[in-house]
Amino acid sequence: MRVEVFTVDDMPRINEGDDLTRLILERVRLEDNDILAIASSVVAKAEGRVRNLSEITPSAEAYRISRKLDEDPRFVEAVLEESCEILIESPFILVRRPDGHVCVNAGVDRSNIEEGKIILLPRDPSASAARIRSRIYESTGRRVSVIITDTNGRAFRVGQTGLAIGTSGISSTRDWVGLRDLFGNVLTITNEAIIDEIAGFANLMMGEGDGGTPAVVIRGLSLFEDVDAFHEIIRDEHEDMILRALRRVRFG
Amino acid sequence: MRVEVFTVDDMPRINEGDDLTRLILERVRLEDNDILAIASSVVAKAEGRVRNLSEITPSAEAYRISRKLDEDPRFVEAVLEESCEILIESPFILVRRPDGHVCVNAGVDRSNIEEGKIILLPRDPSASAARIRSRIYESTGRRVSVIITDTNGRAFRVGQTGLAIGTSGISSTRDWVGLRDLFGNVLTITNEAIIDEIAGFANLMMGEGDGGTPAVVIRGLSLFEDVDAFHEIIRDEHEDMILRALRRVRFG
């Protein structure tokens, strides 16, 4: 098997109201089964998910947490407003978002935006992915998968990797149940989180900063399915041992 | 940027003593800067890291844990012998290995091996990677990076992804500190765990079971460095909030 992964080059800086799909389609000729990975930051900007810190009034809770972190209370307030549960308050804020995605700072970001502003995550990243997929199909007739990526830390290991935070046109996992191994034993691995394996590599290709490129195409995998299945990647909160441990310990 | 990722096809079944590097080099013409990802299972088999369950005598501790899991106590004994710390005892065994790698069952696996046998992880996966890299250089003069991959679950999300468990010829992370973003702000992201982003995608390409292929080449990235730096990916145990939470809660 041979797969090609390439960046969509020369994308302009994205602003609210920009037609991101059109900007991508002007720069790349997509084919059936292509996977288009897009950085959440540009999806969010195009959707206007940007806030001015000066227009945010911190709550008492935001002030309390901001003092522990030596952080701007307006930034903390934005994080709290994006979250449904705080798992760790310090030395960093780890939250659960309403869709079950667990991440630092609720994905709120101060980089790649003018000073004094912050970028939120897209309100519903899988809905964004579905809209982009549908626009691509209408414009080109091509059936592609769309993955919205974000950069996240993880347990036990240094560094961040790209993760999928919304998808359309691809299953979240590949199920090996019932398949047999080299020796005829039934496989014990059940689910490979393919959207995150793809998002991670796409993130590597995107880079960061002013040399970065926010869209990447993966060509040569045959993973297209006409589904919106992102929610399947979020583990049931009652079955998640690490979530339960964090709830019991209540750091911060 | 354009990257090609391809499987090393038609690899034979690997047994103890096989010259894995030669078997790969007979099937692919490597170039400078290629990254060669190899599944830990075949590295382990070639190194003879296979045990017969019938030759394992379970300890009292292995019996105790095996009863909670309804698991073969000999399998649990093998897991304990590979571990330096048990973080979760049930409903699955999550351990820390001596090199700091945290994983389920200490990476001990019953699939892709004859019934009654188990595959351990390579004793020192980065040493294995270094030997393979050095053999490739001696045979071909090519300077390639080598990543040994394994499949791991993770917090908060369903499914497993490929992770690097040993490397040679590549840094573990890419450091963006001091770089500036699109708007001239200094980037807050400091470390991108490139070896895991690559391992994940390689794992996707490898597949599982009898249709799987244990070696993948990534061509077109320029990440080669003459270093053995895997240990840098393991987070200091005292700084890891989730490790600390699991130690406090003591599940099982």
Image (tube, coloured by chain):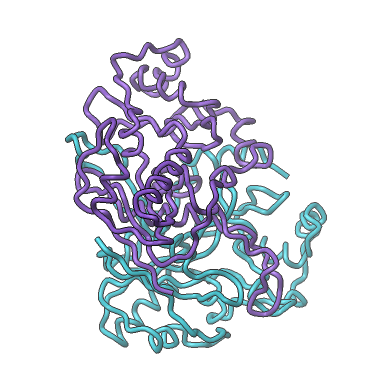
Chain colours: A purple, B cyan
Q: Residue A100, relative to residue B42: is it above or below?
A: above
Drawn side of residue A203 relative to residue A8, left or right: right
* Residue drawn at (81%, 57%) of the image: B70
Q: Depth check: give the residue in front, B71 or A80.
A: A80
The image shows residue A56 at horizontal and vertical percentages of 35, 14
Drawn side of residue A59 relative to residue A205, left or right: right
The image shows residue A76 at horizontal and vertical percentages of 40, 21
Q: Residue A196, relative to residue A95: is it above or below?
A: below
The quadrant in which the N terminus of chain A is found is: bottom left
Drawn side of residue B77 relative to residue A101, left or right: right
**Residue B157 makes an appearance in the image:** yes
Q: Residue B57, relative to residue B23: is it above or below?
A: above
* Residue drawn at (49%, 52%) of the image: A169
Q: Depth check: give the residue in front, A25 or A101.
A: A25
The image shows residue B20 at horizontal and vertical percentages of 47, 83
* Residue drawn at (42%, 31%) of the image: A105
Q: Depth check: give the residue in front, B8 or B199.
A: B8
* Residue drawn at (43%, 25%) of the image: A79
Quarter of the image for residue B117 reads: bottom right
Quarter of the image for residue B26 reads: bottom left
The image shows residue A44 at horizontal and vertical percentages of 35, 34
**Residue B175 makes an appearance in the image:** no
Q: Residue A153, relative to residue B142: is it above or below?
A: above
Count of numbered marks = 0
